[in-house]
Amino acid sequence: MTLREDDIDAPFSRIIRVDTLPRNGETMVIEANAEERAALAALLKVPAIERLAATLTVKRAARGGARVVGAVHGALTQTCIVTLEPFPAEVEEDVDVLFAPPEDSARKRGPAEELEISMLDDDEPDPLVDGRIDLGALAAEFFALGLDPYPRKPGVEFTPPEDEPDAPEPSPFSVLRDAAKKPD
């Protein structure tokens, strides 16, 4: 996920220019502040994000591209889908994303009718916009991918309600039958 510097409205943003990277790349540690975590928690619809940090190494790749490798670490409060109680959770996600200038990713893709997708293929490179990568937005994206979509508080199990034994199902016509029995 890359953004232009003047288009930033992401809650967590750290822009890096690929053309200013040292020859051997650069390792960066980024961390969201309280305001960024609160905005991201609202966006992700979780009660709170206590910590969001990433250690990312950015290296130049062929044809003006870049590769970002590292990990995202976070702590948050989620809501249990069974009890609706808040509980603490952790996120640990590995990051490995290739970025390429837009013309390179379009050239690799080719015409839409020739596009074949295989689970064995590498992911298509993300577009590198204006030679920049938003490491904060990338970390937020991988943090979101690491969230459990159906969070359950540890030790909680869902038990369906028990059916009443031998209770006959009411007939939809029972109202008519009861009405016919009533004297006017």
Image (tube, rainbow, N blue to C red):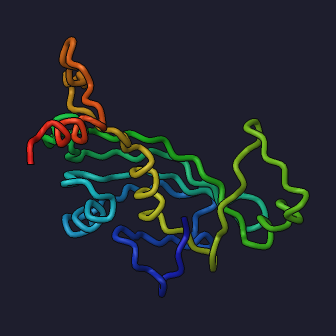
Q: Quadrant of residue 92?
A: top left
Could you tell me residue 138's position as x and y percent?
Answer: 48, 59
Q: Position of residue 100 (x, y in %)?
A: 71, 64
Q: Residue furthest bottom?
A: 6
Q: Residue at x 54, y 64 (%)?
A: 1
Residue occupying image coordinates x 84% and y 60% = 108
Which residue sits at x=52%, y=52%? 57
Residue 41 placement (x, y as % from top left): 26, 60
Q: How many discs appear?
A: 0
Left or right, 78 with respect to 143, comes to left
Judge whether 113 appears above or below 153 on screen.
below
Whole-percent x and y of residue 71? Answer: 44, 44
Where residue 141 sits, quadrant-wise, is bottom left
178 or 80: which is nearer to us?
A: 178
Which residue corresponds to the image point at 23% horizontal and 47% vertical from the top-left? Answer: 76
Whether residue 107 sits left or right of residue 121 in the image: it is right
User: Quick check: can you spot residue 36?
Assistant: yes
Name the one closer to the observer, 135 or 85. 85
Residue furthest toward the left? Answer: 183
